[in-house]
Image (cartoon, rainbow, N blue to C red):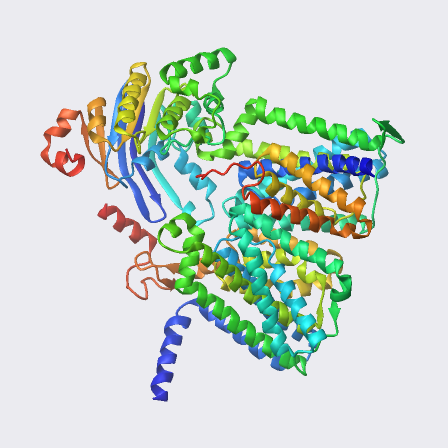
Amino acid sequence: MLANILVTTLVNGAAYAMLAVGFSLIFGVGRIINLAHTAYYMLAGYSIFTLVRVAGLAYVPAMALSILLVTVVAVLCYKLLIDPMREHETTVLIITIALALVFQELMLKYFGGHFRSVPGVAEGSLSILGVQVTRQQAITCAVLAVILAAVWLLLHRTRFGLAVRATAQDMEAANLMGMDVSRIATLTAAVSAALSAAAGALVAPLNILEPHMWLNPLTIILAIIVLGGMGSIKGSIYGAAIIALSESLVIFLIPQGSFLKGAFSLLIMIIVLLIRPEGLFGVALEGER
Amino acid sequence: MLEVKNLTVCYDTAMLLNEVSLKVNRGELVGLVGPNGAGKTTLMRAISGLVLWERQMKRGTRAGNITLTGEVYFQGQRIDGLPPHRIARMGLVLCPERRRPFSELSVEENLKAGAYRVRGRRAYRDTLELVYQMFPVLQKRARQVSATLSGGEQQMLALGRALMTRPVLLCIDEPSTGLSPLIKGELFAKIGEINRSGITMLLVEQDVRQTLAMAGRSYILSHSKIVAQGKKDELMADETIRQSYLGL
Amino acid sequence: MIRVWLLRLYRDFKGDILALPGRTLACLAVLALFIAPLFIRDTYILRIITLTAVYAVFAASWDLLSGYVGQLNLGHALFFGVAAYTSAMLNLHLGLPPVLTIPLGALAAVMAGLVVGIPCLRLKGQYLSLATLAFPIILKGLVYLFKEYTGGELGISGISRLAGSRLVECYIALALGAVLCFLIWKITDSNLGLIFHAIREDEITARASGINTTAYKLLAFCLSGLFAGIAGGFFAHYMRLAGPFTLDVLLSFQAIIWTIFGGITTIYGSVAGVIILFPLMEILRAFPEIRMLLFAAVIVIVLRFMPEGVVPWFLDRVEKECPRCKERNAFTRTRCRVCRVSLSEREVRARTTTRA
């Protein structure tokens, strides 16, 4: 039981963290609340499904190709639909919801509403420190952790990362330092979408695919972002861990009440917000832009 | 080095700059003074490309209805119409009003961000050394988040960050706002020092007395127009200018 | 006496409504909505008209809170759902008539406004919107948890009807919709609206000017809850059903979609958004396979080219603002109808140049 809770928390938490990090990246740089963020996650799942089940590709190349495809789609959406609207914050909100709905309906039309599944890379299970884990879970978790670490390095140890963080703080000042902010924003949109797609591609073998699968993770990552503090990578990871833990607790401790997992996580979020309005790791600064 | 010809800027139906022309030669420290709302900051933003960038960002709204006419030349090249990062890369750097540090980044990261276009570790190290020499307080606070600095320190940081870009022409917009007289004096001394080290400067200030004293030449901007220009003595000699624009 | 009064009414009508194409069109549209049911016997179309009126109030109440006060609420369905469930339960269990249950439901929604508003007072900007998103989802969890009272997935059905015939219900809805939307618009046009506007633009400055922003923000939550609640209670009685879909994330998003499509911070924009989009959604039922797809595509494409919404875009084309007195004028005029100043852009430019 405890082991199950732990494993589920780790796998879900890592996936949530990745989604949340991507979401807060593009929010930070572009001040864009991209509600279509988890739609990319769904698209990646379906893309893998098509490539593996229909085109007959192996899982790993299918995954790489899916991430690439989804990123290209996302960048196109960003350039054509979101970027020109950036000054209209609420319009961006609607456009991204509508985009997510468009993707959902397209998937519904081409794949139908049934649940689909994707084969994994590895069969069987292994035991780590006496805990039984399926190989697929172990691999997924490890890869997610590696990607998260890579993102952290990208943001904190590279020139591009510095530019991203500077742009997120003050776009005009970044501009004056010779940073091409619109290019940086586009690249950030690409990285953000790629993270979402990678999360989708990695957890696809563990989950079932269905066209509405974007809505639940969306509310969850919004809760995580608020919990962890907006624009804080560390916060996103801790927030994801908390939410994933509370979810698995609900699922395993009250199996008949597993429909409550979303409500329970959100309740935790609200309680945290009451105590710390800027989130666990947010910095309360009077910002000016 | 910098030549502005008949620059006119309108935001919607309000005209913020009206046929402004000015010139900055190599090595000079040129002052630009004038009352609040004269258009000093708009002029700086127009030269550095931020006005057009703002238009690009706000297209489709009323606030995006900005027109800019006239010409700006920097080192013989026409730069009006270029995006701000291109202008910055050419060596024309604006140290913006209200300092604008990257507030959640540490002091050192701020300086590193300033060196964004400086290639090579050596060049970066050398420039950093130079900036730390000029502003020792920044080295002391290197690891501190920049929002927690005092106003004076933040201004030093903004100057340091601008210097990290290795500018040819440095425009500084109202560096002394909100600083104590003591810090103000120190700051002006640093600005003079920077200028003597070979960086051409265009200084926008509210503190008229200091600016006129430091600057080789000064322009007076009022009601979106250049109303007078010249050396300190020439400007002070004219009774009307002295009383109505300089208040000295 | 009556003649003078009528004359004044006529003059106001001519001066304030006929003078502006936007207002004339709005009047015509409302008039058409009121006359149409007389000639329509089809209950399906009557139903669309009724629901349009209900949703118009719902969308306008969102605009009041999110557009004017700037408290971007992503969980507006909470108010709708709370009122719908409260009305339904009061009606079913206590047997109260709709005349009582709808106000009581709205009162419950006001309470919900307080429950959401108090914790959200500490939150700012995007944190607030994301936190508000959570409330209806939590409540939905509770609805599923207490199945025996709420009916779970199926909701509460079998509540009493509003009136004997669909036509009467339609007229009640239209009258209620018109009055409430007008009231909301009047609120935003009053001193209170000005305070709300100030809070949105700069809360700290507003507080510094002596406005108790806390109280006013709570008031905004309550007012918005009240109007959304009336819509919710009405909806429950009209559909004779209060189900979990009244708490759906997508219903919250609908209110946002309608308002932004029509034009945020205008009230009339949100009403126009509902009047355009809700029937459109029904027309699209002709293509059930791609209905949502078409709907979403229409929104994306329209907003891509009219980012401020349809109504402001349209008004910008048929009306222009006087540069001097800021009064709106029909596009056909060359001089302002109030201060007679020339409206031609070139002349305005020329004048500012000489003045400077």
Quadrant in the picture for residue B243 = top left
Q: Nearer the viewer, residue B238 or B83?
A: B238
Q: Is residue A201 visible?
A: no
Q: Nearer the viewer, residue C172 or A108?
A: C172
- Above or below: residue B227 compared with residue A258: above
- Above or below: residue A12 compared with residue C219: above
Image quarter of the N terminus of chain C = bottom left
Residue drawn at the location 58% of the way across and 25% of the way down? A156
Residue drawn at the location 73% of the way across and 30% of the way down? A144
- Above or below: residue B108 compared with residue A7: above
Quadrant in the picture for residue A44 = top right
Q: Nearer the viewer, residue A200 or C161?
A: C161
Percent coordinates x, y for residue A17 in the rendering: 67, 36
Q: Is residue C113 visible?
A: yes
Percent coordinates x, y for residue B198 in the rendering: 32, 15
Residue drawn at the location 35% of the way across and 53% of the way down? C209
Q: How many marks?
A: 0
